[in-house]
């Protein structure tokens, strides 16, 4: 662990362990007690087994009766039944705790992700963190299991070590020191695997992306039409070979380490056996003592290997805990604490004041900004439209308005106060937003999709009302399961929606939200013109929304707005009502006439 990461490591470990203990205090406490008993079990087994063999030897030599042997056999039976019951209980408790902890880890991850600025989240520093955490979330969730396993191994190791010292100080110390090389070897393996991931991170990203296009049924047709399957396979295989090279290199070093560790354990056991031979030959030990000593040595080697493996797993888990803690710190940095909140009865006045903006991955020396000198206002009760060619900057304005990015210069104000001064989550709650590519979750039903982001108290009658507004009610009623229909044909009775139907469903979800500002980014681009006109008319006359901001490439939609901003190459080149812009006979007029000809 690098020195610079020690603080993150310490805070991360404390945070994760505390989260895991809080998940179920009773369960964790029972596991700790159970693991202590499990750690003592090998010594108990070795002792009872030695006693049984000693009693058999005495019975054969005529020095003990059958009752003594039977008594120890009964003790063995009861002992094994109790330990088996203990182990099964520990297994059940561990499964239950693992499931609870995985949920906790995912909650911490998602909560942190949604508090980080979008610009930072999309950057090259955070992406590898997210990939590592997502790929190893189960490993992180298993941290407490690994630590408890170390604890169990340590109990076994100490109990065995103390018992061996009673036979011989030299043998006990020699056997006890075997733990050092085994632990060092396993820790080296963890460092190698992490270094391997960093070396081939980009290769994994390219491989996974290409695999998606090569194997997803929805992409197979497009790829076949493109005719580039062979080239894609060649690129895919190149990255696979690079990943394989590093993986095999790490595997070889791990195998060498495992062989060295196993070999050292066998050598210690062999040398101890030689010592037992000489002790027995000199009459210094009886049979039961020899059996016990050999069993203890075997337990010591086994517990040492198990403990070293658990330390390796725990260290690997802890290395990813640093990633989670770094993510948590970024989230805390981007959300520093209490901020201004918008009052419930407050009218929102939104202003862009000479805003310049370029995306984080776009050079400041680029030929042009994404947005340049953008200034406009959106008053309460106003309907504003943003129009222009694709790529002109309309969606960038929406992203800035919602606080996902920070302007490079200029300011966005809410009632005269800078947007950055407001609590973003509470601020966003004032908006009902339908993005250009609105999310439809195919693993959910129609009802579940519509209720996402909406209160659970919403009734079916309200859902049907918005479905009728977007002209989707008739279709949903025709489905056997209606609102409970899954949107995936891989699920029983599931259906696939067309692009237009998905857009209507997303629009229905947005319209159901009780927010003061309605933001629609190309809400009807996949819907026919007649249906679009009916839907937009109904939306624009809905009294629930104080303000409406709509982005549309169809000027027949935009012309209903009180004010229209025509965006070109990141600048507002014209603004006014539909009639005012038509009278100017500029860019808006030309686009409107061009579109009108297409409908004739």
Image (cartoon, rainbow, N blue to C red):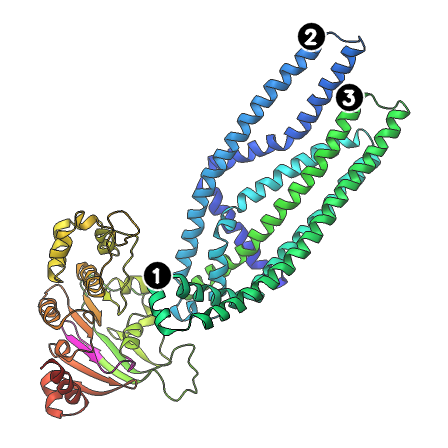
Rendering quarter of residue 159: top right
Q: Which residue is mark 3?
A: 288
The structure residue drawn at horizontal position 74% and vertical position 15%, both measured from the top left corner, is: 56
Q: Judge whether residue 385 is colored magenta.
A: yes
Front residue of 322/197: it is 197
Rendering quarter of residue 570: bottom left
Q: CA distance from mark 1 to mark 2?
A: 73 Å
The structure residue drawn at horizontal position 60% and vertical position 23%, both measured from the top left corner, is: 80
Q: Is residue 418 visible?
A: no
Front residue of 365/343: it is 365
Against 17, residue 382 (above or below) is below
Left-right relation of 474 to 441: left
Left-right relation of 333 to 41: left
Q: Earlier in the sequence, mark 3 or mark 1?
A: 1
Is label 3 or label 1 in front? 1
Q: Which residue is mark 1?
A: 217
Q: Earlier in the sequence, mark 1 or mark 2?
A: 2
The range drawn in magenta is: 377-393
Left-right relation of 472 to 431: left
The structure residue drawn at horizontal position 35% and vertical position 78%, both measured from the top left corner, is: 407
Q: From the image, which quarter does the C terminus lie in?
A: bottom left
Q: Judge whether residue 551 is colored magenta.
A: no
Q: Which residue is mark 2?
A: 67
Rendering quarter of residue 506: bottom left
SS at circle 1: helix
Q: From the image, which quarter does the N terminus lie in?
A: bottom right
Q: Identify the residue at the far right of this view.
A: 282
Against 47, residue 209 (above or below) is below
Front residue of 386/416: it is 386
Q: CA distance from mark 2 to mark 3?
A: 18 Å
Pointer 3 local density, CA inside 10 Å: few below 14, some 14–19, many at least 20:
many
């Amino acid at each position: 662990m690098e020195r610079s990461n020690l603080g993150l490591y310490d805070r991360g470990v404390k945070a994760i362990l505390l989260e895991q203990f809080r998940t179920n205090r009773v369960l964790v406490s029972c596991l700790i007690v159970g693991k202590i008993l499990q750690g003592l079990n090998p010594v108990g087994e070795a002792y009872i087994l030695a006693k049984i063999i000693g009693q058999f030897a005495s019975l054969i030599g005529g020095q003990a009766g059958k009752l003594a042997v039977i008594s120890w056999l009964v003790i063995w039976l009861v002992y094994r039944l109790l330990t088996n019951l203990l182990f099964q209980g520990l297994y059940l408790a561990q499964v239950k705790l693992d499931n609870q902890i995985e949920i906790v880890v995912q909650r911490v991850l998602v909560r942190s992700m949604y508090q980080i600025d979008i610009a930072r989240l999309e950057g090259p520093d955070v992406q590898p963190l997210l990939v590592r955490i997502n790929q190893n979330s189960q490993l992180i969730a298993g941290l407490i299991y690994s630590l408890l396993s170390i604890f169990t191994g340590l109990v076994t190791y100490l109990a065995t070590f103390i018992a061996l010292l009673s036979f011989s100080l030299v043998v006990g110390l020699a056997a006890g020191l075997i733990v050092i090389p085994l632990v060092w070897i396993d820790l080296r393996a963890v460092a190698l695997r992490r270094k391997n991931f960093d070396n081939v991170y980009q290769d994994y990203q390219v491989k996974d992306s290409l695999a998606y296009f090569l194997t997803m049924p929805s992409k197979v047709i497009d790829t076949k039409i493109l005719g580039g399957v062979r080239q894609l396979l060649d690129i895919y295989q190149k990255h696979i070979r690079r990943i394989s090279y590093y993986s095999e290199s790490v595997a070889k070093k791990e195998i060498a380490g495992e062989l060295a560790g196993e070999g050292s354990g066998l050598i210690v056991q062999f040398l101890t056996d030689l010592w037992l031979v000489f002790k027995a030959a000199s009459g210094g030990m009886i049979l039961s003592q020899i059996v016990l000593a050999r069993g203890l040595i075997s337990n010591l080697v086994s517990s040492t290997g198990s403990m070293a493996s658990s330390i390796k797993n725990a260290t690997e888990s802890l290395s990813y805990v640093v990633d989670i803690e770094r993510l948590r710190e970024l989230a805390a940095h981007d959300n520093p604490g209490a901020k201004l909140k918008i009052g419930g009865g407050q009218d929102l006045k939104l202003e862009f004041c000479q805003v310049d903006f370029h995306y984080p991955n776009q050079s400041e020396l680029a030929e042009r900004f994404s947005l340049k000198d953008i200034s406009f206002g959106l008053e309460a009760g106003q309907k504003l439209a943003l129009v222009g060619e694709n790529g002109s900057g309309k969606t960038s304005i929406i992203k800035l308005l919602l606080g996902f990015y920070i302007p490079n210069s200029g300011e966005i104000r809410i009632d005269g106060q800078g947007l950055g001064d407001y609590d973003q989550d509470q601020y966003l709650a004032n908006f009902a937003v339908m993005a250009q590519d609105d999310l439809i979750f195919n693993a959910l039903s129609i009802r579940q999709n519509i209720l996402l982001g909406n209160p659970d108290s919403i009734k079916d009658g309200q859902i049907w009302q918005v479905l009728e507004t977007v002209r989707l009610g008739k279709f949903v009623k025709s489905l056997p399961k209606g609102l409970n229909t899954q949107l995936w044909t891989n699920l029983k009775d599931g259906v696939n929606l067309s692009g237009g139907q998905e857009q209507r469903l997303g629009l229905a979800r947005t319209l159901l939200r009780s927010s003061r500002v309605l933001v629609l980014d190309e809400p009807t681009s996949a819907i026919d013109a007649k249906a679009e006109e009916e839907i937009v008319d109904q939306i624009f006359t809905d009294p629930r929304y104080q303000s409406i901001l709509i982005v549309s490439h169809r000027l027949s939609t935009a012309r209903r707005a009180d004010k229209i901003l025509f965006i070109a190459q990141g600048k507002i080149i014209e603004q006014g009502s539909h009639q005012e812009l038509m009278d100017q006979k500029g860019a808006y007029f030309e686009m409107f006439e061009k579109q009108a000809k297409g409908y004739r």
